[in-house]
Image: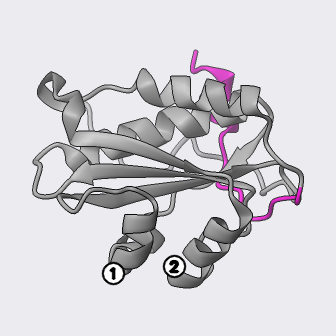
Amino acid sequence: MVNTIIKNRRAVRKFTADSVSDDEIKNLIEAFQNSPCGMHQPDVMNLVVVKDKELRAEIEKATGNSCYGAPVLFLINTKKDNMFGERDASAAAENIMLEATDMGLGSVYVMGGAVKLNDFADIQKELGIAQDFETTVIVPVGKIAEEPAKEDRTSRYQVTIY
């Protein structure tokens, strides 16, 4: 039987203005820390957590409002041209999103906004992201303002068994 947390995870794009507690953020960081990494190379990925309202506003503007006004952003950054970067970042994002779901928080996987953010060297520098790294995924997290519709995912993708 598939874990209920996996079944209940949904892309949330409407958040309340309520903040996410430091304890909740700690748990989400722990989920990030426990994500797999290709060839056991932990030095090719890092995380920047943005709670600051002004910084979040800058990121929202730069990304075309792709963070949906979430009260905390998890920016997963990977070393440029690393063959495992996008895969590691996606696995880490899934860990964060599943932990958020388990805590009753909403989250969403944002890749297009992450790509846009890389065009803003000044913001990357302000966030302390080294020049040889790029933001690969942003995971906005917050309290859910509007529950997304539940859909039947039992036959979502084609599956072939030999």
Q: Residue at x 47, y 73 (%)?
A: 113
* For residue 16, side relative to residue 126 (left or right): right
1 or 2: tag closer to the N-terminus: 2
Query: Looking at the image, which is closer to me, 7 or 84?
Result: 84
- The secondary element bearing badge 1 is classed as loop
Which quadrant would residue 29 be assigned to in this image? Answer: top right
Q: Residue at x 42, y 21 (%)?
A: 34
Q: Residue at x 33, y 81 (%)?
A: 119
Question: What is the span of residues highlighted in magenta in the rendered image?
Answer: 1-17
Q: Residue at x 83, y 48 (%)?
A: 19
- The secondary element bearing badge 2 is classed as loop
Q: Residue 25 in the image: state x and y as whole percent.
A: 67, 34
Badge number at residue 119 = 1
Where is 12 relative to 42, above or below? below
Residue type at the position of mark 1 = Asp
* For residue 156, side relative to residue 81 (left or right): right
